[in-house]
């Protein structure tokens, strides 16, 4: 009797995004059972309780842009510990909505200050103050970056969010050891 | 295309064609059921050759030629999708995305945007060029329409349709280089320009979500890029002469 | 023994104190023995004044007090072959009488007795090529316009000289404006045009003033064979040196290029067949028609006939204006005429933002269209900037790219958006924080902008990068930061 081949070690990561890509991932519904047969989910905000990104990951889907110090640290860590990294959804691919604050990168105070002032002072009903909890609330980076401007990325899966169908087709290719054929409206398209 | 002109012959991607001698390469390419992407071109408006997406390779020509403004010639051997052209087209589309602020997720034109479609057509899954996040503005001074400059790709369709079809010439291009923008009147708020007839043709032909009707929310824009051709034809063929 | 002074009254010497020098000389010998003239060539030593003695001797002095005695026998002067500049520095540019006395408009008068086709043929035989940069055969262009059957045709002079380090056309207009007018009038007769325009950049106020004076005087004297020549002043756009953008600008439109064909020869200004040549090209015409095309073609090389004016500047001992035979080597120009570099010469930049850098090892390259092109540079309009060892090549490339970013008209995407990305990529090399991927991207984007831009400005914008990558690649590689990802 032979031992079954070790399962692919699979992770998903949530950086600066709305979690919509993960919701779309959950829309895979019963196909998730098939996925669970093929992979071992070692890190994921929706399918694992692990707090530290583990070593030896085979495939990692990364949702969200890189907007703060925690995002940056995790991005570097996951790259160092993963064989294949996928920019998962428009925020990871383009910085998308989180990146809009980059419009204020050139103004007085920069985008970080502008967004904090707007969010926590100007729009506050009561108790206007900047959040300040060193070591707990991560510092914002001056610019929000797409993942590939921070770490090398192996595949891009655009969409806001990518549909469950698109995610499934993409993963099926990878699980079969094939290059995903990223072409046509089924697999490509922002928004 | 005039029937009186002699026909010319050539080939596109190995497929033989016969065309009127005054036809453009783009007409012939599309007539043959083939496809090259375009953004500035629109049937019914004067071509300007500005977006450079319809560039094709013609054997014997030292440079790539824009199909929209190149007239066919006898014996032309044309290639529309060489590896070089495909690379350059994708780079061009990435440059379009990077130079503006195109966020499909909440754009009025999401799902009906020609830039979004062209990105799919050229296989763009990300931009290798960093996004520039230019600080532009939104002109909502017109009672019915808005112009969001962040989404403008400077195709000048609005400029041309207003000048050539509507005859109002509300729009122009102002400024230079990467700071170019579409301007209304003498660089005034759109709503202050008395020449505007509020016909909406600029909104109809805008390939992105830059020009839109105020009632349109995310993904609700319904452009009508066919209108200039219809109107130009109607005029030349006197569709309304008895009305 | 009486002396007559020729005082340079061109822009560079004016900036160096020509007015004070002239005042001093006029007080010394009387105003009637001091004549203002155009460029005396050795601009770096200005203000310049030449003392012509009655016995035929001539001396040259530099400085307001005449403190620097200069040597006409120096190779800087001795190796020049003035054709376009034959009267520049001798004639008073504001005096039509002086110009007429020195032969201006004599060739035009003679040409009026000759059939138009013969004039065109003479230019074809001369082998003259466009001096604005592209090097299109001038005679061929004249033939194309002459062959158009339209009743109305136009002659346009492109005087929108804008390359950094280029002042050839300015010197011609400031120094001998009647030569330009005569060349244009001959051209108009040859191609059958009845009106003419000069499009000159607003940054050349003295050239504009001299042209205005010259046009008024020539019209007044009736020496232009009835050709009305109108002046059009640019509004500061470099791209208006591109012929279709220039024509749009004359028409009152936005200065942006359009795809060709149709070429201006078939459909140019107001849709009329238009002959458009640059200042130096027109200024070569009177001598060619006077001496014959064969005379001109006997100078220069097989593919590049005649003489060419260059503006020599940068890290070089003698800066100024030179006119040499085509085919003169860069070494002759830089080492003999220019007196060598101020520091260690590293390269010579030709062709401005559309050109490239020739490394010092290739200084024996003859200056002709083909040789420069083979090295990834171009003849261009005639700017020649000597680069010394202190200049880092990625920085030089970024300087020119910034120029192109600032001067892009914004009509076509590759030039409008591609140059911006190229400048930012070059920033990474200048600041030594580039990755190998950046180097690959830089080369690929250069290729894209070059191959897909609408007009010559965009198509040639990557040239300074490509040329320095070709000869100084090590400098780019040395700017790669090992730790940078991705």
Image (cartoon, coloured by chain):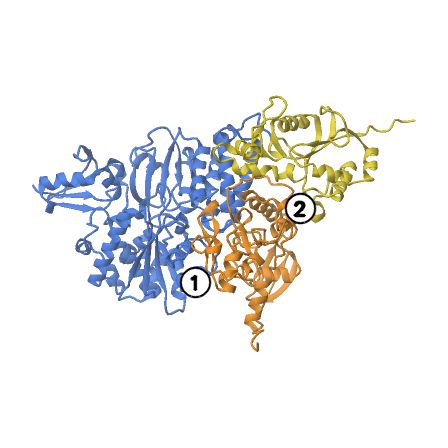
Chain colours: A yellow, B orange, C blue
**How far separated are the C-alphas under marks 1 and 2?**
43 Å
Side (left or right) of A83 relative to B102 = right
Of marks 1 and 2, the one in the foreground: 2
Residue B20 shows up from this direction: no
| Chain under callout 2 | A
Of A136 and B26, which appears nearest the observer? Answer: A136
Q: Mark 1 touching mark 2, by CB under 8 A?
A: no
- Say few, some or many: other residues with alpha carbon within 10 Å of mark 1 (under 14 / 14 to 19 / 20 or more): some
Residue where numbered disc 2 is placed: A189
Of B11 and A159, which appears nearest the observer? Answer: A159
Q: What x and y, as percent, mark residue C356?
A: 43, 40
- Furthest-bottom residue in this view: B242
Q: What x and y, as percent, mark residue C192?
A: 34, 66
Q: Residue at x 35, y 46 (%)?
A: C326
Of C200 and B19, which appears nearest the observer? Answer: C200
**In terms of image quadrants, where is residue A187?**
top right
Residue where numbered disc 1 is placed: C267
- Furthest-left residue in this view: C1
| Chain under callout 1 | C
**Helix, strand or loop status at disc 2:** loop
Disc 1 with disc 2 on a shared chain: no
Against C414, is B196 above or below?
Answer: below
**Helix, strand or loop status at disc 1:** loop
Q: Image quadrant for the C terminus of chain C?
A: top right
- Furthest-front residue in this view: A126
Q: Residue at x 38, y 33 (%)?
A: C387
Against C253, is A102 above or below?
Answer: above
- Say few, some or many: other residues with alpha carbon within 10 Å of mark 2 (under 14 / 14 to 19 / 20 or more): many
Q: What x and y, as percent, mark residue C61?
A: 18, 36
Residue A148 shows up from this direction: yes
Q: Image quadrant for the N terminus of chain C?
A: top left
């Amino acid at each position: 009797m032979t031992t079954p081949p070790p399962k692919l070690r699979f992770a998903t990561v949530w950086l600066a995004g709305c979690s919509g890509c993960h919701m779309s991932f959950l829309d895979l519904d019963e196909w998730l059972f098939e996925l669970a047969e093929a992979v071992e989910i070692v890190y994921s905000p929706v399918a694992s309780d692990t707090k530290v990104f583990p070593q030896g990951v085979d495939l990692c889907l990364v949702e969200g842009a890189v907007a703060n110090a925690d995002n940056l640290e995790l991005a570097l860590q996951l790259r160092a510990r993963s064989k294949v990294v996928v920019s998962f959804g428009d925020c990871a691919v383009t910085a998308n909505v989180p990146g809009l604050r980059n419009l204020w990168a050139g103004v007085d105070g920069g985008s970080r200050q502008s967004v904090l002032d707007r969010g926590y002072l100007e729009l506050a009903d009561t108790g206007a103050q900047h959040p300040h909890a060193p070591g707990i609330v991560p510092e914002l980076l001056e610019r929000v970056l797409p993942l590939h401007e921070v770490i090398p990325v192996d595949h891009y899966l655009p969409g806001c969010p990518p549909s469950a169908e698109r995610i499934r087709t993409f993963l099926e290719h990878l699980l079969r050891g094939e290059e995903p054929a990223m072409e046509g409206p089924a697999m490509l398209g922002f928004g | 295309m005039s029937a009186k002109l002699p026909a010319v012959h050539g080939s596109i991607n190995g497929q033989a064609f016969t065309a009127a001698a005054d036809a453009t390469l783009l007409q012939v390419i599309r007539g043959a059921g083939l496809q090259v992407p375009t953004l500035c071109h629109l049937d019914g408006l004067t071509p300007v050759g500005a977006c450079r997406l319809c560039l094709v390779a013609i054997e014997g020509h030292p440079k790539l030629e824009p199909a929209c403004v190149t007239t066919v010639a006898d014996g032309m051997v044309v290639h529309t999708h060489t590896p070089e052209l495909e690379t350059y087209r994708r780079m061009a589309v990435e440059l379009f995305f990077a130079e503006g602020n195109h966020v499909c997720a909440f754009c009025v034109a999401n799902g009906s945007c020609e830039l979004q479609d062209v990105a799919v057509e050229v296989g763009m899954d990300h931009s290798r060029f960093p996004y520039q996040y230019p600080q532009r503005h939104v002109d909502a001074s017109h009672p019915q329409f808005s112009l969001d400059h962040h989404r403008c790709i400077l195709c000048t369709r609005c400029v041309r349709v207003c000048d050539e079809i509507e005859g109002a010439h509300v729009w122009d291009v102002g400024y230079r280089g990467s700071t170019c923008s579409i301007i209304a009147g003498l660089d005034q708020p759109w709503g202050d320009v008395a020449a505007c007839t509020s016909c909406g043709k600029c909104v109809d032909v805008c390939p992105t979500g830059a020009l839109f009707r105020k009632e349109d929310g995310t993904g609700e824009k319904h452009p009508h890029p066919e209108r200039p051709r219809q109107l130009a034809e109607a005029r030349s063929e006197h569709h309304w002469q008895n009305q | 023994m009486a002396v007559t002074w020729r005082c340079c009254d061109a822009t560079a010497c004016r900036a160096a104190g020509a007015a004070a020098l002239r005042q001093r000389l006029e007080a010394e010998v009387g105003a009637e023995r001091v004549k203002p003239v155009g460029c005396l060539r050795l601009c770096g030593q200005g203000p310049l004044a030449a003392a012509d003695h009655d016995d035929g001797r001539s001396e040259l002095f530099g400085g307001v007090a005449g403190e620097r005695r200069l040597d006409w026998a120096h190779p800087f002067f001795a190796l020049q072959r003035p054709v376009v500049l034959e009267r520049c520095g001798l004639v008073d540019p504001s005096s039509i009488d002086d110009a007429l006395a020195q032969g201006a408009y004599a060739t035009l008068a003679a040409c009026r007795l000759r059939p138009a086709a013969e004039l065109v043929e003479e230019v074809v035989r001369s082998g003259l090529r466009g001096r604005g940069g592209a090097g299109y055969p001038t005679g061929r262009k004249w033939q194309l316009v002459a062959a158009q059957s339209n009743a109305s045709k136009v002659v346009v002079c492109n005087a929108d000289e804008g390359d950094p380090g280029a002042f050839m056309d300015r010197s011609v207009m400031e120094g001998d404006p009647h030569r330009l007018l005569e060349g244009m009038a001959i051209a108009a007769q040859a191609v059958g045009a009845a009106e003419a325009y000069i499009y000159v950049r607003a940054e050349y106020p003295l050239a504009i003033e001299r042209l205005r004076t010259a046009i008024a005087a020539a019209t007044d004297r009736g020496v232009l064979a009835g050709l009305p020549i109108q002046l059009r002043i640019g509004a500061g756009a470099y791209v208006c040196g591109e012929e279709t953008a220039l024509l749009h600008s004359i028409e009152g439109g936005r200065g942006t290029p359009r795809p060709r064909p149709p070429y201006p020869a078939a459909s140019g200004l107001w849709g009329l067949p238009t002959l458009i040549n640059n200042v130096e090209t027109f200024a070569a015409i009177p001598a060619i028609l006077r001496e014959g095309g064969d005379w001109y073609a006997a100078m220069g090389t097989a593919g590049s006939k005649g003489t060419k004016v260059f503006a020599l500047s940068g890290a070089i001992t003698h800066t100024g204006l030179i006119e040499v035979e085509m085919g003169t080597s860069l070494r002759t120009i830089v080492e003999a005429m220019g007196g060598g570099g101020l520091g260690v010469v590293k390269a010579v930049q030709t062709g401005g933002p559309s050109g490239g850098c020739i490394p010092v090892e290739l200084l024996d390259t003859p200056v002709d269209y083909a040789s420069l092109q083979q090295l990834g540079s171009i003849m261009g309009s005639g700017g020649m900037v000597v680069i010394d060892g202190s200049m880092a090549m990625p920085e030089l490339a970024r300087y020119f790219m910034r120029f192109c970013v600032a001067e892009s008209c914004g009509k076509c995407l590759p030039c409008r958006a591609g140059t911006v990305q190229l400048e930012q990529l070059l920033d990474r090399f200048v600041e030594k924080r580039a990755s190998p991927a950046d180097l690959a991207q830089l080369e690929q984007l250069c290729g894209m902008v070059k191959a897909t831009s609408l007009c010559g400005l965009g198509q040639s914008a990557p040239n300074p990068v490509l040329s320095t990558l070709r000869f100084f690649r090590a400098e780019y590689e040395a700017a790669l930061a090992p730790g940078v990802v991705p």
